[in-house]
């Protein structure tokens, strides 16, 4: 308690609030030190591309978390959409085409249809939460099971039974794995798409009435109601729009992997939640930013990729991920406790 | 040097405490003499609670020193404070109501015999302390059965059992009746004679003048003055607390009541709460006060009007047309605003910015091409911050960092931005310092001068008498009468408040 602790305290606080960004930096540095080849443009490109689909799912999840909810059905939603869109986008002439007489549908149409489908399921979740007050964890847990059941019924049918759906339209594959050439640099389309989706999310969260209502409902639902926010409508929209994000990711995933099965998307919600938490989304609601979630996703992708790159046993990933999640939440708790 | 020779039993030197950019306390220097009652006064937001929490180990000072009986203290928790012989009796008593009095006194340090709790010793020791304080409370009685004042006495006894050197009392008389205050003062005086230091925090200047030997006045986080109580007059204390001459507590009121009837409430009823047969009219430019005891359902009346509770019977007319308000959103659209009683619970979004808290009820008015426009938001927020003197480091500061009074001002701004016709205010000045209260009164007068109508619910009768045109008294959910504020007094209002008990 001596004088001039002031400077120390301020910089210490700022440090702790931004630790998570420093952790990311640290991980990258460690990996580079061990294997300098990590710092190559190709690698960075791959990391960003790999993060792209998870980022889109995480952005959807972020909305639900900010609103003090959780969405355990995200992964299965990605899976359902992957399967349905895959069946609609198989190349004509493919030997195991599900809908033999279906022409190759325009990509845009499929995207739109899938997003609408996602929105419908999301609204259902939102309705259970908003109208019947079923806690989000229970609602989405149930939806997770229901969606998986529906996906399985759709997937495992005669005449081909339970087989991964392949022969995906070249257009979709190109979209998810191709790149645009600017001069001598190749930028994967996925990165551009993810950046665009992030931008859309940012506008939605920060510049629309709906976005501010979302923060209000998450920050203090009672105060939101008293302030004239339509909490009911906002809740439903949050889950619906989040599911649209998952759906969009689902179609992209089909192109990225080249096929779809009932395994697609399995447990994606876990990574999404982890990325959001690490990215500063507060468990108590009302707090979260797009940029934070982007960093959160990158941290996990770097862990996955980096550890593999330096030859660490991939099971270490789990331990590292778990520790990072704990660290992030400890810091979150600390910063909200300090305000008292 | 023996304890009795030491000049001060507690010294606070150059203590400074910050919360994320907001300086709550700056260079606080206070010295408490043993055997004295030292009052700590100041408006809310002046730093009294923060200072006490620093002394009680709840907050860690950023700078400065605390010296108790010659020893430097670094406290990181209330239990360390208690071990250092600093005791505190909070305004909200922290007691286990379902346990006996003696168990509450000895919580955490029950006397043991052969490893098991020794209830006989506990009883004897508790009785001894109570006798020493002249209290007639049965140590075996259930704490929840005691009156608030007796429960307070139990808290003090607990502190005594710790052999405290410093006892801090936070607004100890806020829930006490006059004769109970007498008992408290007797106990304080007898404790003080034993050479301990007592820090007495209170807004009630008359009591402070009676019980304390010294007064320290805080304002905006620093010490304005410390001196012998006998050297201060009441007016001097108030002046030093607010920093300006306060000749009147309420701004001068003119009659702005117009003839047009803004709202008519007929036979309003809400079955769940017992609100029944409420009938009144509200004119343009009128301030209608709502008075009544705790449990009279004053808040519930406002909530029913605002659409938070259902209108089970009766009608509400706005400018002659019947309206059906089933949600706050509807109420806002119809021109209502509600400033709630418990801003922390349902008023503020504590982790979100001042700007967010201000604009949330009115987002559509800040849109440009369908998107929220910062160049529309920022000037409006800045205008209100200046207009009603909201003290905040910036418009991005989380509202939770602001003092209660400033939070309330932000809530007010929120509703002013929506330009309502009728403002419903539920205890608008509760927990707010004298200076901010005056500003809010001025604001209310300004609003009615512009033709708005205001309904104020308040448990402070002087406030209603000073600010209303008419006062409606509720008693147990029923209407006990409507009085002309100029022609009535506290006795008449109180008598009406007891009509349907």
Image (tube, rainbow, N blue to C red):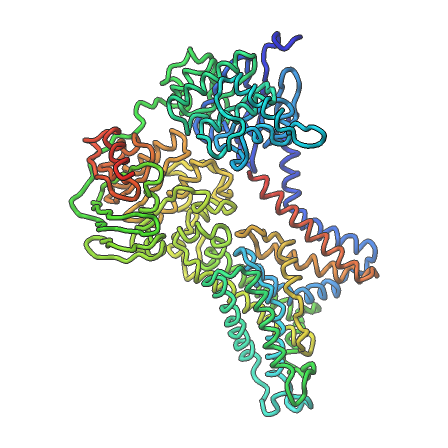
Pinpoint residue B292: horizontal percent, then vertical percent: 30, 37
Residue in the image at 56% along x and 20% along y: B129
Left or right: A184 in relation to A59: right
Left or right: B376 in relation to B292: right
Pinpoint residue B219: horizontal percent, then vertical percent: 46, 25
Residue B271 vertical placement versus A134 (above, below):
above
- Is residue A4 among the parts visible in the rendering? no
Residue B52 vertical placement versus A190 (above, below):
above
Q: Quadrant of residue B14?
A: top right
Left or right: B455 in relation to B46: left
Residue in the image at 59% along x and 15% along y: B9
Left or right: A53 in relation to B291: right
Q: How many marks?
A: 0
- Is residue B317 among the parts visible in the rendering? yes
Name the outermost residue toward the left. Answer: B259
Residue in the image at 33% along x and 43% along y: B297
Residue A231 vertical placement versus B43 (above, below):
below
Pinpoint residue B464: horizontal percent, then vertical percent: 28, 34
Pinpoint residue B215: horizontal percent, then vertical percent: 47, 17
Q: Quadrant of the C terminus of chain A?
A: top right
B187 and A179: which is toward the camera: B187
Q: Quadrant of residue B440?
A: top left
Residue in the image at 55% along x and 78% along y: A108
Residue B70 vertical placement versus B452 (above, below):
above
Q: Quadrant of the N terminus of chain A?
A: top right
B31 and A85: which is toward the camera: B31
């Amino acid at each position: 308690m001596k004088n001039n602790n002031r400077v120390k305290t301020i910089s210490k606080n700022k440090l702790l609030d931004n630790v998570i960004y420093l952790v990311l930096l640290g991980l990258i540095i460690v990996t580079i030190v061990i294997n300098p080849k990590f710092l190559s443009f190709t690698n960075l490109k791959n990391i960003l591309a790999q993060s792209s689909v998870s980022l889109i799912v995480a952005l959807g999840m972020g909305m639900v978390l900010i609103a003090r909810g959780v969405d355990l059905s995200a992964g299965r939603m990605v899976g359902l959409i992957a399967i349905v869109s895959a069946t609609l986008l198989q190349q004509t002439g493919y030997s195991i085409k599900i809908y033999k007489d279906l022409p190759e549908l325009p990509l845009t149409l499929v995207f739109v249809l899938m997003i609408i489908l996602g929105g419908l399921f999301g609204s259902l979740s939102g309705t259970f939460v908003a109208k019947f007050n079923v806690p989000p964890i229970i609602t989405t847990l149930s939806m997770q099971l229901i969606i998986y059941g529906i996906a399985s019924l759709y997937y495992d049918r005669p005449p081909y039974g339970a087989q991964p759906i392949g022969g995906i339209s070249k257009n979709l594959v190109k979209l998810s794995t191709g790149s645009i050439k600017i001069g001598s640099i190749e930028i994967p389309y996925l990165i551009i798409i993810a950046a665009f989706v992030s931008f859309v999310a940012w506008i939605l969260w920060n510049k629309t009435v709906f976005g501010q209502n979302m923060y209000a409902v998450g920050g203090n639902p009672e105060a939101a109601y008293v302030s004239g926010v339509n909490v009911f409508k906002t809740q439903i929209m949050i889950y619906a729009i989040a599911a649209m994000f998952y759906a969009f990711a689902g179609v992209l995933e089909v192109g990225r992997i080249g096929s779809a099965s009932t395994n697609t998307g399995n447990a994606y919600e876990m990574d999404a939640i982890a990325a959001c938490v690490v990215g500063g989304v507060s468990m108590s609601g009302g707090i979260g930013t797009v940029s934070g979630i982007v960093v959160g996703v990158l941290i996990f992708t770097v862990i996955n990729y980096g550890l593999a790159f330096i030859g660490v046993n991939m099971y270490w990933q789990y331990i590292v991920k778990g520790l990072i999640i704990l660290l992030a939440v400890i810091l979150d708790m600390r910063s909200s406790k300090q305000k008292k | 040097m023996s304890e009795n020779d030491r000049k001060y039993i507690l010294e606070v030197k150059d203590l400074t405490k910050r919360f994320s950019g907001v300086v709550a306390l700056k260079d606080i220097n206070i010295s408490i003499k043993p055997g004295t009652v030292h009052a700590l006064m100041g408006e809310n937001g002046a730093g009294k609670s923060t200072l006490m929490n620093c002394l009680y180990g709840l907050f860690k000072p950023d700078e400065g020193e605390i010296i108790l009986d010659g020893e430097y203290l670094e406290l990181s928790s209330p239990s360390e404070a208690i071990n250092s012989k600093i005791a505190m009796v909070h305004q909200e008593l922290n007691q286990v109501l379902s346990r006996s009095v003696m168990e509450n006194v000895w919580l955490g340090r029950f006397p043991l015999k052969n490893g098991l709790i020794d209830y006989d010793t506990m009883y004897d020791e508790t009785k001894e302390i109570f006798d020493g304080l002249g209290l007639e409370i049965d140590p075996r009685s259930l704490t929840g059965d005691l009156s608030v004042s007796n429960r307070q006495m139990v808290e003090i006894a607990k502190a005594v059992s710790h052999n405290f050197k410093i006892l801090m009392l936070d607004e100890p008389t806020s829930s006490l009746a006059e004769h109970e205050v007498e008992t408290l003062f007797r106990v304080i005086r007898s404790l003080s004679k034993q050479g301990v230091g007592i820090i007495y925090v209170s807004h009630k200047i008359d009591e402070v003048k009676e019980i304390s030997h010294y007064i320290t006045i805080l304002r905006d986080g620093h010490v304005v003055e410390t001196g012998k109580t006998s050297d201060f007059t009441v007016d001097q204390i108030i002046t030093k607390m607010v920093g300006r001459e306060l000749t009147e507590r309420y701004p001068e009121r003119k009659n702005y009541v117009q003839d047009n009837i803004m709202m008519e409430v007929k036979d309003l009823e809400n079955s769940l709460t017992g609100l029944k047969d409420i009938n009144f009219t509200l004119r343009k430019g009128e301030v209608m006060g709502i008075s009544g005891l705790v449990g009279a359902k004053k808040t519930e009346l406002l909530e029913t009007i605002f659409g938070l509770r259902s209108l089970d019977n009766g009608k509400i007319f706005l400018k002659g047309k019947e309206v059906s308000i089933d949600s706050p959103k509807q109420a806002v659209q119809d021109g209502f605003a509600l400033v709630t009683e418990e801003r922390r619970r349902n008023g503020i979004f504590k982790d979100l910015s001042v700007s967010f808290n201000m604009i949330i009820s009115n987002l559509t008015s800040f849109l440009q091409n369908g998107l929220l426009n910062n160049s529309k938001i920022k000037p409006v927020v800045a205008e209100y911050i200046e207009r009603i003197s909201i003290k905040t480091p910036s418009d991005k500061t989380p509202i939770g960092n602001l003092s209660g009074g400033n939070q309330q001002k932000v809530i007010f701004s929120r509703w002013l931005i929506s330009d309502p016709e009728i403002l419903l205010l539920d205890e608008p000045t509760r927990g707010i310092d004298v200076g901010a209260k005056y500003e809010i009164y001025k604001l209310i007068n300004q609003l009615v001068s512009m033709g708005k109508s205001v309904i104020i619910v308040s448990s402070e009768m002087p406030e209603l008498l000073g600010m209303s045109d008419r006062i409606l008294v509720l008693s147990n959910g029923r209407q006990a009468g409507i009085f002309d504020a100029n022609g009535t007094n506290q006795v008449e209002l109180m008598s009406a408040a007891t009509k349907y008990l």
